[in-house]
Amino acid sequence: MTRWTYKDAGVDLDLYQRAMEKLPRLLSRTFTPRVLPLPGGFAGLFQLDFDCPLFARKYRKPILVACADGVGTKLKVASMMGRHNTVGIDLVAMNVNDAICCGGEPLFFLDYIALPKDDPPLLEEILSGIVRGCQLANCALLGGETAILPETYQPGDYDLAGFCVGVVEEENVITGANITPGDLVIGLASSGLHSNGYSLARKIVFHHAGYKVGDLIPELGATVGDVLLEPTIIYAAAIRRVLRHYSVKTVVHGIAHITGGGIFENLSRIVPQGVEILLQRDSWPVPPVFRWLQQLGNVEENEMYRVFNMGIGMILVVSAYYAESIRNQLAEVGIKSWIIGQAGQGPKAVRWAD
């Protein structure tokens, strides 16, 4: 009689254990003294406050901010390229950029990695990107889960999900309710597609046009794979810096992360009743990758703005008096921005000024 083992079913526990042994070293690169040691624990421990001048926050009415997101079919491009050390940055970015929209300081991050088989080198490569993302966001990678799911995923496939927890003082929660007529809209530059619209992008590039990931696109000065794998910008640290600068005044009235649904849908989520946001066409340079995709797939302009960020990865709605000061602070940390619109009085809406 055959004696079946877990390895026969597709899960090699010895290989899995070797992969797990590398994780503490990777995670520790993101730790601060607020992370409490718990070797072999079933969860991670994080100290909300800390009795040290460098880390003390002295919260009065702390509100926790939590969010979850994934990378989507950008992972397909990573598999085609055989390059997996940047999608972890995307994973962290999609979460911490959401958290900062409420004014939340990202505290810690948890990941979920699902693989079709045990693959320690692949796991380490993916985690290296997640670690880098957490370092850029100034948050701790506190733990996570690695699932081996044979038959659920085909060879070469895997999936990522992430979970971020942050904190903000109750009086500093940003909801958009303070947006008033006269406020200016600042658009922060994206690095490209970020992690949205890849189902359409892949359909156009690989299925319709027949490109391969290694093909050079002269007008973009890079290969297809390099363009499509460009990591999402992590804005959380830069925006936290701006918010700390105006710790006494309420200057930033609304923040919108431009993800699936594009500029209009995401900005609409934070606009209060009685306020109309008018955006100015041609107020920022649309990166060439979007026009290349549009022409390649004969995509209508409205569809482009519904699916992609079109060069604006994050939006701040701010008091007009402080707009240029905020833009200068963003520029100091390497983030380009433009005044792309203004809030006015009218029925709740986000639309082009013309």
Image (cartoon, rainbow, N blue to C red):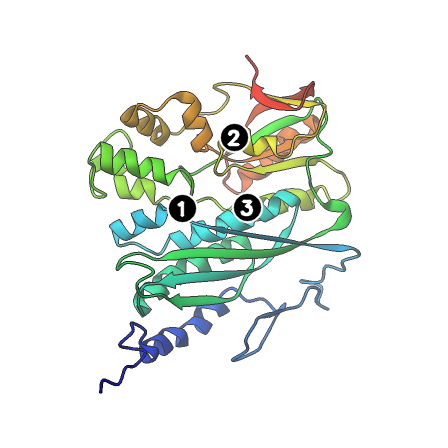
Q: What residue occupies the far bottom of the structure in this picture? A: 1
- Nearer the observer, 158 or 56: 158
| Amino acid type shown at disc 2 | Ile
Which image quarter is the C terminus in? top right
Residue carrying label 1: 231
Give, as a three-letter code, the residue at label 1.
Pro
Q: Nearer the viewer, residue 281 or 324?
A: 281
Q: Nearer the observer, disc 2 or disc 3?
A: 2
Q: Where, quadrant-wise, is the N terminus in this rendering?
A: bottom left
Q: Earlier in the sequence, mark 1 or mark 3?
A: 3
What secondary structure is marked by label 3? helix
Q: CA distance from mark 2 to mark 3?
A: 15 Å
Q: How many C-alpha atoms fall within 10 Å of the one at disc 1: few (<14), some, or many (≥20)?
A: many
Q: Are marks 2 and 1 in contact (CB under 8 Å)?
A: no
**Disc 2 or 1, which lies upstream in sequence?**
1
Is 315 displayed left or right of 222 in the figure? right
Q: Is residue 221 visible?
A: no
Q: Position of residue 127 (x, y in %)?
A: 41, 62
Mark-to-mark CA distance, 2 and 1:
19 Å
Q: Percent x, y for residue 119?
A: 30, 68
Residue for badge 2: 263
Mark 1 lies on a secondary structure that is loop
Most extreme residue toward the top, as rendered?
Answer: 354
For the residue labelled by badge 2, is the local secondary structure a helix, a strand or a loop? helix
Q: Quadrant of residue 318?
A: top right
Horizontal and vertical percent for residue 149? 35, 65
Q: Residue at x 35, y 56 (%)?
A: 85
